[in-house]
Amino acid sequence: MDSLTHGSFIWLEAVCAERNVARRYTVALSRDLFGASIVEFAWGRIGTKGQGRAVSFACADEAARFARQRLRRRASAPKRIGVPYREVSLAP
């Protein structure tokens, strides 16, 4: 997860039947037509539409830093929801 570059896509899931937890979280880095870096992230219960947001950055380093912050928050899931997120898909 440290090598986030444009075109990266990360899909995480936290699943625990005993706790009724079935969450997903995705992060994607890309560029728009004007050269700005875009970080798109989405979250929600597995099997639902969920929610999403996109944030634009002028600098690719700022976008990667923002994406790493989002992923660090997911790493703290065991303390918050009692279930860790696991990486389902990682595309460079």
Image: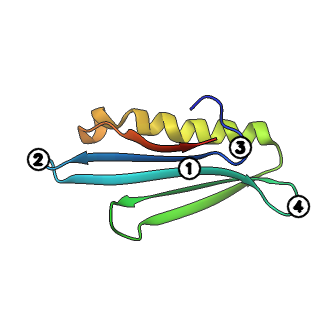
Q: Secondary structure at mark 2?
A: loop
For mark 4, give the secondary structure: loop
Residue receiving disc 2: 18
Q: Earlier in the sequence, mark 1 or mark 2?
A: 2
Mark earlier in primary sequence (1, 4): 1
Mark nearer the N terminus (4 vs 3): 4
Q: 28 left or right of 60?
A: left
Crowding at dot 1, Cα within 10 Å, few <14 / some 14-19 / many 20+, comes out as many
- Residue beneath disc 3: 63
Q: Secondary structure at mark 3?
A: helix
The answer to whether marks 2 and 3 mark residues whose Cβ atoms lie closer than 8 Å is no
Amino acid found under the numbered disc labelled 2: Glu
Mark 1, secondary structure of its residue: strand
Mark sitting on residue 76: none
Circle 4 sits on which residue? Answer: 34
Q: Which residue is mark 1?
A: 27
Which image quadrant for residue 77? top left
At label 4, the amino acid type is Phe
